[in-house]
Image (cartoon, rainbow, N blue to C red):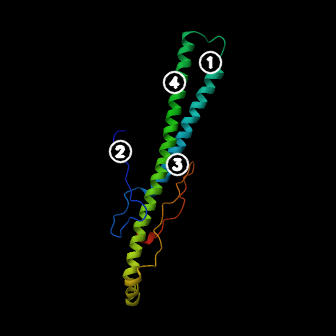
Amino acid sequence: MSGDTSVQLTVYGEAAANDANVPFPLSSALPAACAAYRLAEAVWASRTTMTTLSTSHLSDADFKGPHADVSDAKVAAYGTSASNMASGLYAFSRQIAEGWAAARGQQDRINFARYCEDESSNDGWGENAYESVAGEDDYGPPPENPPVPAGPGFAETREPKYSAFGP
């Protein structure tokens, strides 16, 4: 694959109520990470199976010569390729989960900003007068990113925050 297709997300606390929702497939990302992880495990298992079959079936004392050498080389090449593929798939599943955590955190900060704006618009005149001098103190800090889910299950590590104000 060529080109950078990653999405750059805003850091903690930098979100506005009028920001667009985060363009990330929040509902399907973790199942995709889980599927990539399962595929990595299957590829790794095929490598192990191939090595076991080669060792048990092709180590016969009668199987020697150029065909045995070619077979050994192909088994070794398959093992290397399968290891590389499995490592790549494990890393890919981890990257999907990291992307989910970053996107979930940013969407929660946008939802938080929308919540704050909604609450502020519903304040009474007395509270608005006080807060014009003392500042807004109702909301606390914006949410941080949730912990990154881990394989093999890649379960959500926390519920969405302020979900009434966005996905």
Q: In this view, does 130 lie above or below 106?
A: below
| Residue that badge 2 annotates | 4
Q: Distance between the residues labelled 3 and 2?
A: 23 Å
| Residue that badge 1 annotates | 58
Q: In this view, does 9 lie above or below 43?
A: below
Task: State the SS at label 2.
Answer: loop
Q: What's the mark number on residue 77?
A: 4
Residue 1: image location, x then y, percent? 37, 38
Task: State the SS at label 1.
Answer: loop
Number of the front mark, 3 or 4: 4
**Which residue is nearer to you in this view: 158 or 153?**
158
Residue 66: image location, x then y, percent? 54, 10
Q: Earlier in the sequence, mark 4 or mark 2?
A: 2
Residue type pointed to by label 2: Asp
Which quadrant would residue 126 be assigned to in this image? bottom left
| Residue that badge 3 annotates | 34
Number of the front mark, 4 or 2: 2
Mark 1 and mark 4 in contact (Cβ < 8 Å)? no
- Residue under the image location 59 percent in, 35 percent down: 45
- Residue under the image location 43 percent in, 62 percent down: 12
Q: How crowded is mark 3: few (under 14 residues within 10 Å), some or many (20 or more)?
A: many
Q: How far apart are marks 4 and 2 (CA)?
A: 30 Å
Residue 56 visible at all:
yes
